[in-house]
Amino acid sequence: MTRSALKEAILARLDTIPEPCSIAMRDPMSLVEMGLIEDIVLDPQGAVTVTLCLTDPGCVHFNGMRAYIADAITTLPGVNSVNVCQTLDTLWTDERVRRRAT
């Protein structure tokens, strides 16, 4: 799988992971739809780093999301390890939300 195809496959998997607070608000959206994916970095050895821009830097769901992300991505061919971190340099705003067309 090419790096570009792998990145697209990772993004597709991330788009299947629900964002916990959106579920609580009865408006379920994926991590991608919520605009939480700040960056995806692939290194030549198969290490993937996913950086999230959380709605709240102290998000209580971060560890759970980290586990879901790692579980979803590690099964992809070419992925040897997954690191999930959060950016503290960028603030999330509702302008990041990307709704799917219905």
Image (cartoon, grey):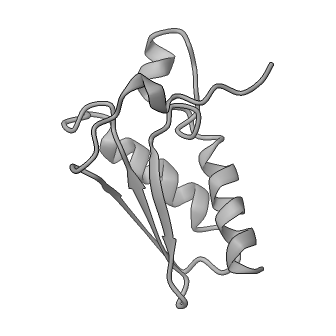
Q: Is 1 drawn above or below residue 94 in the view shown? A: below
Could you tell me which residue is drawn at 49 percent across and 37 percent down?
35
Going by the picture, which residue comes out furthest to the top? Answer: 26
Could you tell me which residue is drawn at 66 percent across and 81 percent down?
78
* Quarter assignment of residue 61: top left
Going by the picture, which residue comes out furthest to the front? Answer: 95
Left or right of residue 73: residue 96: left
* Quarter assignment of residue 5: bottom right
Quadrant of image for the C terminus: top right
Tell me residue 10's x, y (percent): 63, 60
Left or right of residue 92: residue 89: left
Could you tell me which residue is drawn at 59 percent across and 48 percent down?
14
Q: How many marks?
A: 0
- Foreground residue among 97 and 10: 97
Q: Is 98 drawn above or below residue 79 in the view shown? A: above
Left or right of residue 69: residue 64: left
Tell me residue 65's x, y (percent): 42, 44
Could you tell me which residue is drawn at 44 percent across and 14 percent down?
24
- Foreground residue among 95 and 84: 95
- Foreground residue among 21 and 32: 32
Whether residue 76 is visible: no
Quadrant of image for the N terminus: bottom right
Tell me residue 32's x, y (percent): 57, 40
Whether residue 32 is visible: yes
Q: Is 28 drawn above or below residue 62 in the view shown? A: above
- Foreground residue among 86 and 63: 86
Tell me residue 86's x, y (percent): 30, 52
